Image (tube, grey):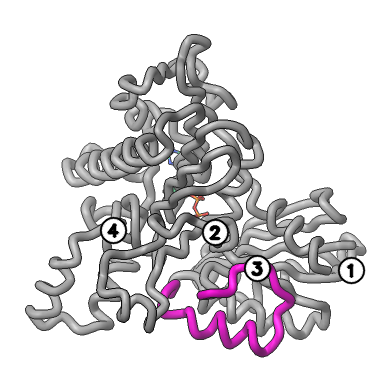
């Protein structure tokens, strides 16, 4: 069975074509709307052209869907699932609307479409990890709980380290840290929405809720707050320069340095918290754009983890090797290229 796996973002589409679990090829279209790719339909047509050129006809299209509310199992997309994805747009505005748009466009290919939810891996988190300390009538009536995201990526990491206590750090444009015990997730820093947890490119991570009350009282509208929280905060908000870690690392600006300091500190704090949640740590794994590529950020994050017996091998770290800890380190430190598309293909094959 030939699968086209799509990971659609606001201005990019990552895609991979699988024959069963075998990856045939993949690609990335970036800067949609700001390049020869004027919109997502144009980009998807380009992928279709590439398939035709390669003489490949697809049996199903698999979509990464970030938020599906209470639906986290992989599903064939029908009107009901489309409605669920639509209803969750407010909770994942950087993702769901674009995924929905891609699903609508892909209807013309006339093959089954499958949704693999980012929340799936976290569907059975312990109650103490998913419960927010708010009046429970309120949380029950509004389905407020920790859903967790980046599930396919953390699942990929967990499958590589299925034994022992693992902390998986997905550090890309969106960032999250997850605590995994013998392959079972026990906590994750992203929560009810995609705003929680560690500092991200344009999102702030965990915030004192009093700050939002203050901004509301000062007259900021709901739309303004959404824009601030999803698009103007995080690395971009602190640095006032960029949401892109490479740009900040290349900069001598004090605000860029501060943004990196705050980012590193926020990841360190989650690792410390999750080492406590797991009562120990065997493996610390880094993945996604920053995690896979930035030796300096990995080094800085690991600096305050020597109390766990973690020792980094600088040479291995600088060479982006798969294991970057010393032989004597009590914690194995790993760098893995995440393969969300493979996890998604497997999920889809299970139901097709
Ligand atoms: P997305 O969530 O969009 O898939 P990625 O996983 O591609 O994001 O991660 C994007 C982030 O990774 C950006 O902040 C980018 O600057 C950062 N990044 C990529 N390569 C490097 C590198 N060599 N050094 C530091 N940061 C990097």
| Residue displayed at 69% across by 53% down | 343
Image location (x, y in percent) of residue 82? 62, 84
Calculate the distance from the C-alpha at mark 2 to the C-alpha at mark 3: 11 Å
Residue extending furthest top?
Answer: 328
Q: Which label was assigned to residue 57?
A: 1
Image quadrant assignment for residue 19: bottom right
Residue 45 visible? The answer is no
User: In the displayed structure, would residue 125 be above or below residue 326?
Assistant: below
Calculate the distance from the C-alpha at mark 3 to the C-alpha at mark 4: 28 Å
Quick one: label 1, few (<14), some, or many (20+) residues within 10 Å? Answer: few
Image location (x, y in percent) of residue 3? 81, 63
Q: In screen coordinates, is 163 left or right of 218?
A: right
Quick one: label 2, few (<14), some, or many (20+) residues within 10 Å? Answer: some
Q: Is-magenta flag for residue 193?
A: no
Q: Which label was assigned to residue 124?
A: 2
Residue 54 visible? The answer is yes
In this view, the mark in front (2 or 3): 2
User: In the displayed structure, would residue 338 be above or below residue 64?
Assistant: above
User: Mark 4 = which residue?
Assistant: 204
Residue nearest the observer in this picture, 284 or 301: 284
Q: In screen coordinates, is 2 left or right of 312?
A: right
Which SS class for mark 4?
loop
| Residue displayed at 52% across by 45% down | 288
Whether residues under marks 3 and 4 lie with C-beta atoms below 8 angstroms apart, the answer is no
Calculate the distance from the C-alpha at mark 1 to the C-alpha at mark 2: 36 Å
Image location (x, y in percent) of residue 128? 38, 56
| Residue displayed at 51% across by 23% down | 332
Q: Which label was assigned to residue 73?
A: 3
Whether residues under marks 1 and 3 lie with C-beta atoms below 8 angstroms apart, the answer is no
Calculate the distance from the C-alpha at mark 4 to the C-alpha at mark 2: 26 Å
């Amino acid at each position: 069975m030939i699968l086209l796996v799509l990971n659609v973002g606001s201005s990019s589409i990552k895609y991979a074509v699988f024959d069963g679990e075998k990856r045939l090829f993949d690609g990335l279209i970036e800067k949609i709307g700001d390049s020869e790719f004027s919109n997502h339909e144009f980009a998807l047509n380009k992928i279709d052209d590439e398939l035709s050129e390669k003489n490949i006809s697809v049996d199903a299209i698999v979509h990464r869907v970030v938020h599906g509310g209470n639906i986290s199992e992989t599903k064939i997309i029908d009107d009901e699932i489309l409605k669920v994805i639509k209803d969750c747009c407010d909770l994942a505005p950087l993702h769901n609307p674009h995924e929905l748009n891609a699903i609508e466009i892909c209807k013309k290919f006339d093959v089954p479409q499958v949704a693999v939810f980012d929340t799936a891996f976290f569907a059975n988190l312990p109650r103490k990890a998913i419960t927010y300390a708010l009046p429970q009538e309120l949380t029950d009536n509004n389905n407020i709980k920790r859903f967790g995201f980046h599930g396919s990526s953390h699942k990929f990491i967990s499958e590589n380290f299925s034994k022992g206590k693992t902390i998986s750090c997905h550090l890309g444009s969106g960032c999250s840290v997850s605590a995994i015990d013998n392959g079972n997730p026990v906590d994750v820093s992203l929560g009810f929405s995609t705003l929680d947890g560690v500092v991200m490119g344009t999102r702030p991570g965990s915030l004192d809720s009093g700050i939002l009350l203050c901004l509301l009282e000062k007259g900021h509208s709901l739309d303004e707050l959404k824009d601030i929280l999803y698009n103007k905060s995080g690395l971009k908000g602190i640095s006032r320069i960029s949401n892109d870690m490479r740009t900040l690392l290349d900069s001598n600006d004090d605000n860029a340095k501060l943004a990196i300091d705050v980012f590193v500190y926020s990841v360190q704090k989650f690792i410390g918290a999750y080492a406590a949640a797991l009562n120990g740590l065997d493996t610390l794994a880094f993945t996604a754009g920053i995690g896979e590529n930035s030796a300096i950020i990995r080094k800085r994050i690991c600096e305050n983890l020597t109390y766990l017996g973690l020792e980094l091998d600088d040479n291995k770290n600088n060479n982006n090797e798969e294991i970057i800890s010393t032989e004597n380190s009590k914690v194995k430190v790993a760098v893995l290229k995440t393969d969300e598309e493979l996890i998604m293909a497997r999920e889809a094959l299970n139901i097709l």
